[in-house]
Image: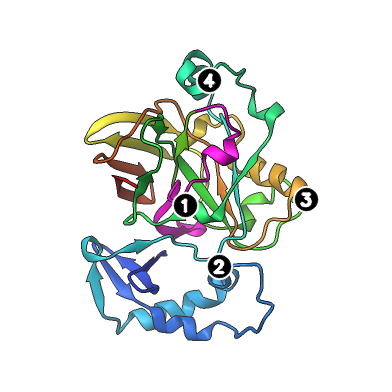
Amino acid sequence: MKICRYNDNRLGLLDGERILDVTAALDALPAYKYPFPRTDQLISNLEMLKGRIAEVAKGASSIAVADAHLLPPVANPGKVVAAPVNYKAHLEESRNDVEINYNRKVIEIQTIGLFLKSTSSIVGATEGVRITFPERRNDHEIELVAVIGRTAKNVSVESALDYVAGYCIGLDMTIRGPEERSLRKSLDTFTVLGPWLVTADEIGDPAGLQMVLTVNGEPRQNANTRDLIINVPNLISWASSFYTLNPGDILMTGTPEGVERVVAGDTIDARIDKIGSMQVKVRAA
C-alpha cells in the first residue's frame, strides 16, 4: 500500500495518479485520553487498519495527486534519528569541500554516531522548504527514510527490518556553518517527508534502491542504497541500542554525494525506486 495524508488531514490510498479518500478507516483507531501515547497511532495500528483501508477504498471518492496538498505521511513522530556521512563518496566530498566541513574534521559515522533532528522541522512535499538564512549556504540532501512500525529496543540486525512499517523519501536540508548538526538541520521545513508512506511489504529489501535528485532539472545526486556504509538493518539495530524506537519514529539513513546549494525559487525533484517522486518548492522565509 501507498498511504498518504493530504489536505485537511485526510487519509489517502494511492491509486495510480489519484488518491482515494479512505479517511473513514480511521474510525477503527482506539480512543485515548490524556496523557496521550507518545507514538503515532496510525503507524501503531497500521497492520490492523490495512483491511479496513482496502474495504473503504472500494467506494471512495478520489482526487488527482497533482491537486492534493500532501502532508508528511506520519503525523506524530516521536523523534527523528539521522545518520551522518553514511555514503563513502559523500564522506570524501565533505572532507574535500571547505564550504561543507567549515574547517572541521569530518569524522566517520562509525565514530561520530547518529544524531537527532527536531520533529518541528517536518513538513510534507507540498509545503516545501523555507530559506530562513539566505546569506548562508543551504543544501539539499536526499535520503531513504524508514518509518518504525513497532517498539524496538536492542533488536538484532537479522530481525531489524521486521520493525519497519514502511518507507518514504526524505530531504534532510542543511545550513552550512560552525554549529552542531542537529541545530543546522532542525530549522522549520528542513525535514521534508513524502510523498507518501510505502508499506514495507512493497519494498522488501531496502538495499539496491536507486535515488535521484535534480534541481530545476539539473542532475545533482544519483546513487544507490546498496552503497550505504551502514545499511538499514544495521542502522536500526544500532539506533535501538541507544534509544527505544517507537511506532512512527523516523530513521533518515544518510545522503550520497552531490549535495549543493538551493535558493528561493528552485524546485527540487527527489525520486527513489519503488516509492515514487516528490517535487518540492524552495521559497523565501
Q: Residues within 10 Å of mark 2 (few under 14, many from 20)?
A: many
Type of amino acid under label 3 = Asn
Nearer to us: label 2 or label 4: 4
User: Residue 123 location in percent, x, y?
Assistant: 42, 56
Q: Which residue is mark 2?
A: 43
Label 1: element kind: helix
Residue at 43% across / 36% down in the picture?
A: 141
Label 4 vs 3, first from the N-terminus? 4
Local crowd size for mark 4, using a 10 Å CA cut-off: few (<14), some (14–19), many (≥20): some
Give the structural element (helix, strand or loop) at label 2.
helix
Q: Which residue is mark 1?
A: 203
Magenta residue span: 177-202
Whole-angstrom CA distance, mark 3 to mark 1, is 24 Å
Q: Tell me which corner region of the image, top left, top right, bottom left or bottom right, holds residue 232.
A: top right
Residue type at numbered disc 1: Ile
Of callouts 2 and 1, which one flags the residue occurring earlier in the amino acid sequence? 2
Residue at numbered disc 4: 102
N-terminal-most mark, 2 or 4 = 2
Q: What residue does disc 3 label?
A: 154
